[in-house]
Each structure stands twice: as structure tokens, then as C-alpha cells.
Amino acid sequence: MSTLEIKDLQVSVETEDGPKEILKGVTLTINSGETHAIMGPNGSGKSTLAYSIAGHPKYSITGGTVTLDGEDVLEMSVDERAKAGLFLAMQYPVEVPGVSVANFLRTAKTALDGEAPKLRTWVKDVNGAMDKMHLDPSFSQRSVNEGFSGGEKKRHEIAQLDILDPAFALLDEIDSGLDIDALKVVSEGINDFRAREAKSVLLITHYTRILRYVKPDQVHVFVAGRIAESGGPELAEELEANGYEKYVAAGV
Amino acid sequence: MTAAVQEALELGKVESHLHPEGSFDVEAHEVPKGREEIWRFTPLKRLHDIHDDAPFADGATKVEVEAAEGVTVETVAADDDVRGLSGLVPTDRVSARAWAASTGATVVRIPTDTVVEGATVIRHHGTGSATAGAGHAVIVAEKFAKATVVLVFEGSAVVADNIEIVVEDGADLTVVSVQDWADDAVHLSTQHAKVGRDANLKHVSVSFGGDVVRHDFSAEYAGPGGSVESLGLYFADAGQHIEHRLFVDHTAPKTKSNVVYKGALQGEKAHAVWIGNVLIRKEAEGIETYEENRNLILTDGAWADSVPNLEIETGEIEGAGHASAIGRFDDEQLFYLQSRSISETEAKRLVVHGFFNDLIRQIGVPELEEKLTGTVEAELAKNINTLITKDNA
Ligand SMILES: Nc1ncnc2c1ncn2[C@@H]1O[C@H](COP(=O)(O)OP(=O)(O)OP(=O)(O)O)[C@@H](O)[C@H]1O
Ligand SMILES: [Mg+2]
């Protein structure tokens, strides 16, 4: 069970000219088992929303609340949020030179469970997850994301989603930079995850392309740091046809 | 003067501050005051006067040799001709004093065509003696020989030494110098290599312990096609001064050098200095050189100086480059790891391991790799405690 409740969230970043407000009051509830899609133009604050929920130190929360099953997420450190069940697949996954994927995953899993994973099943699980994402087993020995292509980085994020099995997945433009085959592979990975019990997904994207494979329960239009409109899957179709113009022009 | 020295002096004279005139005469080197270019980073007050006129005596370290099969290790008298074989001519007072004060030399010889399995280890245990020691060693890999020699320094001592490395034509030698000293040790080491035609030298300096550790490593080439890989790894703790001065003198065409030094610093007044000098002489056409120094500052109060110098006297080179960086933890890396449930402390530990890992792998001495990873871990354990107390404060 996990319900993520975001209420009137306001977020700013420090810039050379002082703090700049990016999120101007975001309210959104994602119930257990639901998939929500957020769509919006460049620079509207989608990544800021994802990072703020995950606890990136760059963003300061100036107002509002985020709770997971009633627990105050904003009070938690980054790793506590992950342990509470949040997982962020990043738009630009970070390279960690010299740290092998195998070591990284084992360390993460150990931190998550409070004990080291059982060796026998663990290797099988990791290889299985890599294989599903069409990543060669040799990736386990490579440094985290170092020298990975854009698509490989994204598939590696979904392999982690599979292995770490959080309650709640924030997927920030998981579809960008993927060719159609990779998009299908990644979508299958997300759908496998969703098929597990009580998993929630917040899918941030520019394009309706991925929504053909990963069907959302709700779609939100995100413009200028706010949700401008919410609706069902049909809203994505409308955006595909007409773009964001009407929302941007409305100056919402 | 030995034939080798004669030869070295016959190379064209270079008007470069990178290439000071050497001398065996102690009095030709003035007592450093601290403003001299080569001494400006070194805390002279902590040298127990070995840069001035403190006496040297035998017994500062006990030496233990584990020679691999096929390698001979012997002690020769100070007047033996083997001294100076590498072309080493002291360019500072400490090196000149150590040369003059040495009562003998340890000679490690790998005979022609001998390919040696396993490492030859020469262990120096500091005995805690109040009097400083002066050491001299000559490592000779004869033609087409292949071997690994590891020098280990541990315990308490004040030591100045000259280590000569001769890699004859076609030979392939790895020399690792591990400074795992106790906290109060002072070690000033001058290490010089002469690399023959088509020969390979991998020189590795690893510094963890000691109050002041200063290593000057220089290399020259006796013929074309030689290659020097100079690797360094250091971990400076509170109050520690770890200094590396590298000088690769490209004296022959088609030679290669690759210098990579990486260090982590933690604690109040932890200080690391890296000076990377490369000189490409007129006759050194078609050479390739790259030097790099990276410092990771783990806590406040630690600082690093990193100065690469490249002097080029010929336009006919294959490639020359350098990189130098002094940085702190990357927030994005820590965030990424933490967002996968890994605690901040553990994330930092992973990043530091990663920072050193590639380098440790490049050393290519399996017995050592595990030990070094362990030592990095032990060093980090100290830091992690200070971090925790900081967080709790
Ligand atoms: N450090 C910063 N200094 C100044 N502006 C910033 C900083 N970080 C983010 N911003 C701004 O915040 C706004 C929102 O950025 P964000 O990355 O959340 O947008 P996005 O909707 O994810 O865009 P995209 O679709 O391009 O990924 C942008 O205008 C961006 O330039
Ligand atoms: Mg974005």
C-alpha cells in the first residue's frame, strides 16, 4: 500500500540572482496501484517535481507537503525516502567511475533490506533483470553508467527498478533518447513492475509515444510550475493533436 | 665519476628550471630556507634537520628481503661502481647528503632474459631510532628481464634515501614503493630511473602513513622506444604532508610517459603536493606524454597543491597533455547513490573506492591490490568516524 500525496508544493532553486521559484503550488494524489502521466513543455518544472520528491539537495521546499501513506517525506533524508519506497529513474542518470554495477546494486539492495542478499538467487536476479533490459551480463562489471549510451542508461534504470522493487516509481523522461525497440523493452519493464501488487508510477514525458505501451490512469498537463489540467488517457491524445499552446497561452 | 654519469652529462645542455644542475658535493647545495622553488611546499621544520646537517647513522630501519626466484639481492660497499648506474646526480641537499652518508647499497639484480614470477619484496621497518638513516638501493633489470620489485616502508624512522632504477634494453620492470609509515615518520626519497631502448618501467608510489613523506621520482631514457608509466596513490590524514615531485625527461625519440597520481585528503591540515614536470628535449621527436593528478578533498581543513609543467623543445611530438584537479564529492553522484537507499556515509565510501579502483587495478601486482583496497578502507574508516561526529555535533 502506498499513497503519495503532494499538496500545494512550492519549490525554488538558488540562482546567481537569488532564489527562483519553479514549482508554484502542485497538488496531486497518486493512489496505490495507479499510474499517472505528467506531460508538459521544456522547463515547466517536471524534473524539479521529481527531484523534490526524491530529495535532491539543490531544491528548497518553500511551501506545501509531500506524504507517503501519511508519513512526511520532506523530513526524510534521500536514502530514507528510498527505503520508504520511492524510486527515481533519472532523466540523466549519473556516472560513478570505478564503482561496478554489481557492487552498486549489491550495496543498494543490502541497504534496502538491512542484510546482504542471498548470493545464489541474487546473481540470478541481477542477470535476469539485465537480460530483460537487453543488457549484456558484462554490464555488471562496468562502472555505473560510465560510457553507457543514452539508451543503455535508461534501460539500466529500469533494471534497477526491477531489482530494488520499490512501491513507487518516479520515471523522469524514461522514454527520451530511446529508439522504438528500446522503448518497447523499457515499456515492458515498466508494465512488469506495474503488474506486481500495489505499485504506483508517476511517468514524466514529453511524448504520447510511451503512453501507447504504458497506459496511464490519469494524465496531467504541467505548465509553468503547476498542473494546468488533469484528465483521463484521452487528454494525452488531445495534447498529441493540439500541443500545449492553449495552456501556455492561457498563462496558467 | 662513473661512465653513466659522464654520459648523462654529455646530453645537450638545457636552459630549463626543470633541469637543475646536480652535484655529489653536499656543499654545492645550500641549506634550504623554504623559499627555493623545489622546497617551497615542504615543511622544513618537520624534517629533523636532515636538510641541514643532522647526522645520519645505520640502524634507523631493519631491512628484510624476500627475493623471488631468479632475482639476486646483495649489499655492496658504498664505493661500488654500481652506485650512479642510473645516472642519478643529486639535485638537492637531502639527496646529496644521503648519497654521501650511505655506508653501502642494496643491489637488486634481475639477470638478462630472466622472467620472474611473483614479486621481490624489500621491507624497511623503522626502528624508532632518534638518529636519521641514509639509504641507497640500485635495482637493475638486465636486458629483456621481466620482474616486479616492491619496497615497503613501515614503522617509525627518519630516512633519506636514493633509489636508482636501471631498466636495460627490452626489459620490463615494475617498481612499487609503499610508504605505510607510522604517524611520526619522515621520509625523503629520491628515485631516479634510466629506461633503455624499448624497455618498460612501471613505477608506483603509494603513500598512506608518515608525518612528512616527500618523493622525488625522475626518469630519463637511454634509447628510443622506452616507456614509463608512473602511478601514484596517496591518502593524507590530519597533519600529514605528502609530496610527490615527478620529472620525466624525454631524452630520446619515440619514448612514452604516462603519469597518473590520485590522492584523497582528510582532516585538519592534511596537505598533499604534486608537481608534475615533463621536459621534451629537441632530440625527443615523436614522443607521447600524458600526466594527470586528481585530488579528492574529503573534509574541511585539508588542502592540495597540484602543479603540472610541460616544457616542449621540439614541435615533432605525437601527443602531450596534462590534467590536474582538486575537487570535493560530487553532489550528483552522492544523490544518485542515496536515491538507491545507500546512506550518505556509504555513498561517500563507494565514491572514494571508485576514485582509486581504476588506479589500483593498473598497478597489476595482484598481491598488492587486495592490500591497497583494504588500506583505503581503513583510511576511510577514520574519516567516516570524524564525519559522524561532525554530523552529530
Ligand atoms: N540551478 C538553476 N538555476 C536557474 N534555473 C534553474 C536551475 N535549475 C533549474 N532551473 C530552471 O527551472 C526550470 C524547470 O526546470 P526542470 O528541469 O524542472 O524542467 P523540465 O520540465 O523537467 O524540463 P525538460 O522537459 O527540459 O526536462 C527551468 O526553467 C530551469 O532552467
Ligand atoms: Mg526534465
Image (cartoon, rainbow, N blue to C red):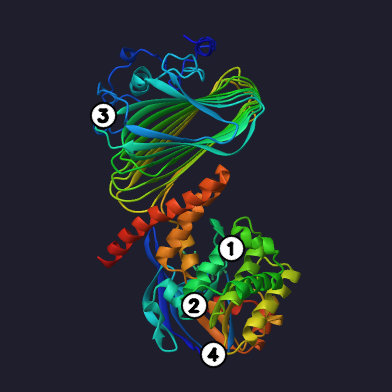
The disc placed on residue A74 is none
Residue B282 vs residue A82: left or right? right
SS at badge 1: helix
Please state which amino acid type lies under the numbered disc 4.
Answer: Ser
Q: Where is residue A163 in the image (x, y as percent from the top left)?
A: 59, 75
Of badges 3 and 1, the one in the foreground is: 3
Q: Pointer 1 indicates a residue of which chain?
A: A
Q: Residue at x 67, y 77 (%)?
A: A189
Crowd tier of the residue under label 1, counting other residues whose Cα lies within 10 Å: few below 14, some 14–19, many 20 or above? many
Mark 1 sits on what residue? A101
Distance, label 1 to label 2, CA atoms, is 18 Å
Distance, label 3 to label 1, CA atoms, is 51 Å
Q: Which of marks 4 and 2 is nearer the N terminus?
A: 4
Distance, label 3 to label 4, CA atoms, is 74 Å
Q: Where is residue A121 in the image (x, y as percent from the top left)?
A: 62, 75
Please state which amino acid type lies under the numbered disc 2.
Answer: Asp
Mark 2 sits on what residue? A113
**Relative vertical location of residue B136 with respect to residue A165 in this rendering, above or below:** above
The disc placed on residue A32 is 4
Residues at discs 4 and 2 in contact (Cβ within 8 Å):
no
Q: Position of residue B209 (x, y in %)?
A: 36, 43
Residues at discs 2 and 3 in contact (Cβ within 8 Å):
no
Same chain for the residues under marks 4 and 1 in the image: yes
Q: Earlier in the sequence, mark 1 or mark 2?
A: 1
Distance, label 4 to label 2, CA atoms, is 22 Å
Of badges 1 and 2, the one in the foreground is: 2
Ligand 2, seen in the image, is in the quarter at bottom right
Q: Which residue is drawn at 58% across and 17% down?
A: B282
Please state which amino acid type lies under the numbered disc 3.
Answer: Thr
